[in-house]
Amino acid sequence: MCRHLAYVGPPRSVASVVTDGPHNLVTQSWAPADMRGGGTINADGFGVAWWPEGGEGATAYRNARPIWADPAVVGVLTQVRSTGVMGAVRSATEGMPITAEACAPFTDGRWAFSHNGRIDGWPGSVAALAEWLPAVELLTMPALTDSALLWTLVRRRLGVSPPGVVLRDVVTEVLDAAPRSRLNMMLGDGTTVWATAVDHALSVRVDEASALVASEPVDDRDGWVPVPDGHAVEARPGHLDITELPTRNAYREGRA
């Protein structure tokens, strides 16, 4: 069911963000500690996105191989430094393609996006949501996966509504259509991280210098805050906001 993280802070190597700490993202790919809803290993590819200094948008490297099997992680990515990094390791839902294009993070301009979870009843459960998207956006999705559809729904709204509102609205719409979905989404622009926790683990650590949002804490340092299920996060250095989202129980009881 995937693991992901995002970092914002002082410049550091892209590789260090996914390899530092005793429970780093590479370790979480083969020994996750808090997988929920199935899955024991994240070996169906990985991706890393970063924001080059002076660049206009996010750059991504993705591979369908397991993260531990790609020498570029400790080779090439050690030479790249950034103040913002997002990484993801993938455990593909049965029937989903295993390709580099299906691996998060997905990027467009300054935005990078990752999804940990699944849309229940895919694809039929969200067919009505897809009908609202322009045909060209559906035909150019990065991959035919639930995560890519979520990214397309999110990207469509960016620039119209604030990022946190965009994630909340997409969670609301998808849970309305498929209430048993697992929707840990992560969105970043290189300065701020927005994320949701819906039926999957999420933790965050923020101090005055940096912010790190991750499926699981990468180390045992003080300051990690578990994000309650059904909540959203906005994090950047010196700032942490955790707010409640509409929950599937609210839908079932007709309150949302």
Image (cartoon, helix red, strand yellow):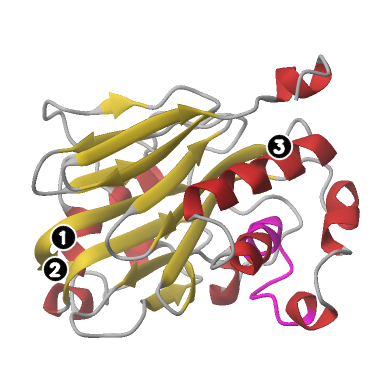
Q: Is residue 166 above or below residue 196?
A: below
Q: Which of 58 and 245 is in front in this view?
A: 245
Q: Mark 1 sits on what residue?
A: 16
Q: In this view, does 165 lie above or below 154?
A: above
Q: Which residue lies furthest to the front in this view?
A: 160
Q: What element carries label 2?
A: strand
Residue 252 falls left or right of residue 119: right
Q: Is mark 1 on a helix, strand or loop?
A: helix
Residue 25 falls left or right of residue 180: left
Dot 2 amino acid type: Ser
Question: Between disc 3 and disc 2, whose residue precedes?
Answer: 2
Q: Position of residue 132 (x, y in %)?
A: 85, 64
Dot 1 amino acid type: Ser
Dot 3 amino acid type: Ser
Residue numbers of the magenta segment: 139-151
Q: Which residue is drawn at 42% across and 67% down?
A: 47
**Disc 2 from disc 1: Cα separation:** 5 Å
Q: Residue 181 carries which label?
A: 3
Check if mark 3's residue and mark 2's residue have beta carbons within 8 Å. Answer: no
Q: Is residue 52 above or below residue 185?
A: below
Question: Between disc 3 and disc 1, whose residue precedes?
Answer: 1
Assign the C terminus to one quadrant of the image: top right
Q: Which residue is drawn at 78% across and 81% down?
A: 139
Q: Position of residue 22 (x, y in %)?
A: 17, 40
Check if mark 3's residue and mark 1's residue have beta carbons within 8 Å. Answer: no
Q: In which quarter of the image is residue 21?
A: top left
**Disc 3 from disc 2: Cα separation:** 34 Å
Can residue 208 be spotted in the picture? yes
Q: Which mark is residue 13?
A: 2
Q: Nearer the viewer, mark 3 or mark 1?
A: 3
Q: Which residue is drawn at 72% across and 18% down?
A: 249
The answer to if 214 sits in the magenta stretch is no
